[in-house]
C-alpha cells in the first residue's frame, strides 16, 4: 500500500532537532515547576503531585529519544526558505530567551533585596507567561498564545492573592501546579508532533 510519504517529503532534520529540544525542555521545566510543591505542601501531598508530573516528563523524554533514533532518516539539507527561517527564528528565540532570563534575574534580585521573596515564584510564572507571546509569532504556533495567557494569569493570580494577604505556601503550591500544567500541555502538544514525524519516518523507510 502506498502511503504517500517518501524521504523527500519528510520534514528536514533541523525540525526534528527542534522538536526533540522542545520535548527535553518541557520535561525539565515540568519537573522544576512541580518540585516547588515540596516547599509549599506536606510531603504526603507533594509527592503524588510531583510523581504524576514526573511520569509525564519521562514520557516526553522517551518520545524525544525515539525521535533521535530516527533522525538520520530525515533529510539534512534545507531549502533556502527553510534555512532563512531557521536562522531568523533561532536569533529571535535566543533574544527572547535571554530577555526572559535577564528579567527573571533582575526581578528576583529586587524582590529579595526588598524583603518580598514570597512573590518570587508567581513573578517568575508571570515572566514565563509573557515570554510565550512573542514565541507564538516567532514559531507561528497558536498554542503559545493560549499557554501565554494561562501562565500569565496564574502568575497574576498568585501575586494578587499574596497582596491580598493569602498565606504563602498554598499560593506557591497552586502557582507551581498551574505553571507545571502549562509545560505539560506544551509537552503533550510537542509529543504529538513528534509522533507524526516518527510515523512519517517509518512509512518512508
Image (tube, rainbow, N blue to C red):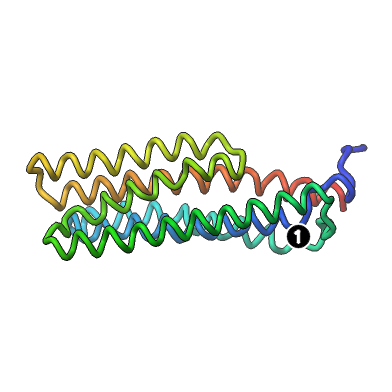
Q: Nearer the viewer, residue 38 or 43?
A: 38
Count of number-bearing discs: 1
State left or right for residue 173 relative to residue 57. left
Instruction: Say above or below: 133 vs 55.
Output: above
Judged left or right of residue 195, residue 116 is: left
Q: Residue at x 48, y 36 (%)?
A: 145
Relative image position of residue 120 (x, y in whole percent): 23, 56
Q: Quadrant of the N terminus?
A: top right
Q: Could you say where residue 183 lies in the image, as x and y percent from the top left?
A: 44, 48
Say which residue appears at 20% left-offset and 53% top-offset.
Answer: 119
Quadrant housing residue 193: top right
Residue at position x 78%, y 53% in the image: 12
User: Is residue 84 positioned above or below 38 on the image?
Assistant: above
Residue designated by label 1: 70
Q: Give the answer, above or below, for where 165 lies relative to 121.
A: above
Instruction: State the image coordinates of residue 103 (x, y, percent, origin top left).
Output: 36, 57
Query: What SS does tag 1 mark?
Result: loop
> In percent of the image, x 45 and y 61: which residue is there?
28
Work out which residue is located at the far right of the displayed protein and give it: 2
Disc 1 crowd rating (10 Å Cα; few below 14, some 14-19, many 20+) is some
Does 203 sit left or right of 54 as displayed?
right
Amino acid at each position: 500500500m502506498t502511503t504517500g510519504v517518501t524521504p523527500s517529503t519528510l520534514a528536514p532534520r533541523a525540525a526534528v532537532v527542534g522538536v526533540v529540544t522542545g520535548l527535553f525542555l518541557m520535561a525539565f521545566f515540568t519537573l522544576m515547576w512541580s518540585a516547588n510543591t515540596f516547599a509549599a505542601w506536606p510531603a504526603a501531598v507533594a509527592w503524588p503531585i510531583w510523581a504524576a508530573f514526573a511520569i509525564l516528563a519521562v514520557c516526553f523524554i522517551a518520545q524525544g529519544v525515539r525521535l533521535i533514533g530516527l533522525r538520520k532518516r530525515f533529510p539534512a539539507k534545507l531549502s533556502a526558505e527553510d534555512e532563512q527561517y531557521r536562522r531568523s527564528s533561532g536569533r529571535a528565540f535566543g533574544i527572547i530567551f535571554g530577555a526572559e532570563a535577564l528579567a527573571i534575574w533582575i526581578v528576583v534580585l529586587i524582590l529579595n533585596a526588598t524583603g518580598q521573596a514570597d512573590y518570587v515564584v508567581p513573578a517568575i510564572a508571570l515572566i514565563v507567561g509573557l515570554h510565550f507571546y512573542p514565541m507564538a509569532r516567532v514559531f507561528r504556533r497558536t498554542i503559545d498564545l493560549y499557554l501565554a495567557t494561562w501562565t500569565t494569569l496564574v502568575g497574576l493570580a498568585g501575586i494578587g492573592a499574596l497582596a491580598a494577604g493569602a498565606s504563602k505556601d498554598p499560593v506557591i503550591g497552586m502557582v507551581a501546579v498551574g505553571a507545571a500544567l502549562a509545560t505539560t500541555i506544551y509537552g503533550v502538544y510537542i509529543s504529538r508532533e513528534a509522533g507524526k514525524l516518527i510515523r512519517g519516518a517509518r512509512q518512508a523507510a
